[in-house]
Image: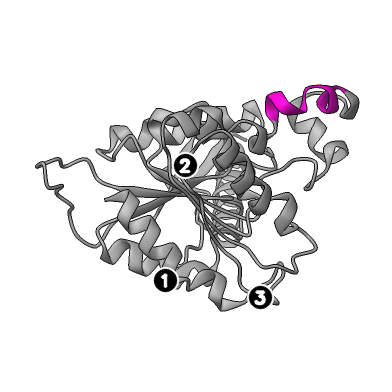
Amino acid sequence: MIMQQRVIASSILSVSFLAVACVLSVFPGRGLAQEPAKKLPIEGQTIVLGQSVAFVIPAAAEFRGADGSTAKPWVWYAPTLPNLPGPEERWMFERFVQAGIAIAGIDAGESYGSPNGNRVFDRLHAEMIRRGYSKTPVMLGRSRGGLQTLSWAADHPDQVAAWAGIYPVCNLASYPGLDRAAGAYELSSEQLKDRLKEFNPVDRMGRLAQAKVPLFAIHGDVDTVVPLELNSGLLKETYAAVRGPAMELVVPPGQGHNMWEGFFQSKELVDFVVRQAR
């Protein structure tokens, strides 16, 4: 009887180990000692900060500033979602790392520039400083990534070297609209409307202007998803009104919210980022 029980227990244990092995083979990267897998445009590291997945792509060479500083420059990319950054970012990412500039980002979900999203961003900033990176990255927001990068920059003007955008969303009322954004702010759409200037990134540029933070955007003139005049165009006007440095705005004619390679292989954008990061 005892021997029979031992045989049964051994069989159950073997089946359990087999089940675990099958799960790990179907879902690679879910072992307790492993970081989650994330496909990146170029080689980098995926990490977990709190409940959020982040990535770091190191520079190709160590950077040393003219003053002898060894704080490593970096670009903060958003949005970091399961499929982003994507292969279209490869060209500019390669040029950043070749210039001695790392790239990092963290998945804040669909936070639309909300305080909750900024708290997720705080984790990445602290982790990058712990790793020896500069406390003043260049923010780079693609599309809706513009909202969270601009919002965090507005809260931390002394911790931002510059901000750049690729057809960036700058205005909650334009995209995603107050009805969709309200949940991320834990408000009703009416409450968000009443408090819009308190939260809307494009309306919060005063402290960045005082800190003389440079801004750059490339944005097509026929974008119907994120209209130029309600986003990058409005940001440029607003920044001038609060006496910030003249914003650089490149407007490719006839381009909308699309995957045109000129958005992702913009020499003007790369030159701006490298110059400001270093």
Q: Residue 156: horizontal and vertical position, in percent?
A: 46, 28
Q: Is residue 152 above or below residue 226?
A: above
Q: Amino acid at mark 3?
A: Pro
Is 192 a magenta residue? yes
User: Which element type, helix, strand or loop, lies under badge 3?
Assistant: loop
Question: What residue is shown at x 61% (from left), y 52% (from top)?
Answer: 81
Hey, which quadrant is residue 26 in on the image?
Answer: bottom right
Q: 268 or 153, which is in the foreground?
A: 268
Residue receiving disc 3? 253
Badge 3 or badge 2: first in the primary sequence:
2
- Give, as a single range, the part of the protein colored magenta: 191-199
The residue located at (66%, 45%) in the rendering is: 170
Name the disc covering residue 267, or none: 1
Mark 1 or mark 2, which has the lower sequence index? 2
Quarter of the rendering containing residue 188 = top right
Secondary structure of the residue carrying numbered label 2: loop
The label nearer to you, 1 versus 2, is 1
Q: Is residue 194 left or right of residue 136?
A: right
Say whether marks 1 and 2 touch (CB < 8 Å).
no
Residue identified by numbered label 2? 32
Does the magenta portion include 80? no
Residue 22 appears at what percent x and percent y? 59, 58
What's under tag 2, amino acid-wise? Leu
Q: Main secondary structure of the magenta part?
A: helix
How far apart are labels 3 and 2 at the CA level? Answer: 50 Å
Residue that protrudes farthest toward the left in the picture? 68
Hey, what amino acid is under mark 1?
Answer: Lys
Q: Nearer the viewer, residue 214 or 147?
A: 214
Does 88 sit above or below residue 11?
A: below
Q: Do we see residue 130 in this rendering? A: yes
Q: Is residue 43 visible?
A: no
Between disc 3 and disc 2, the foreground one is: 3
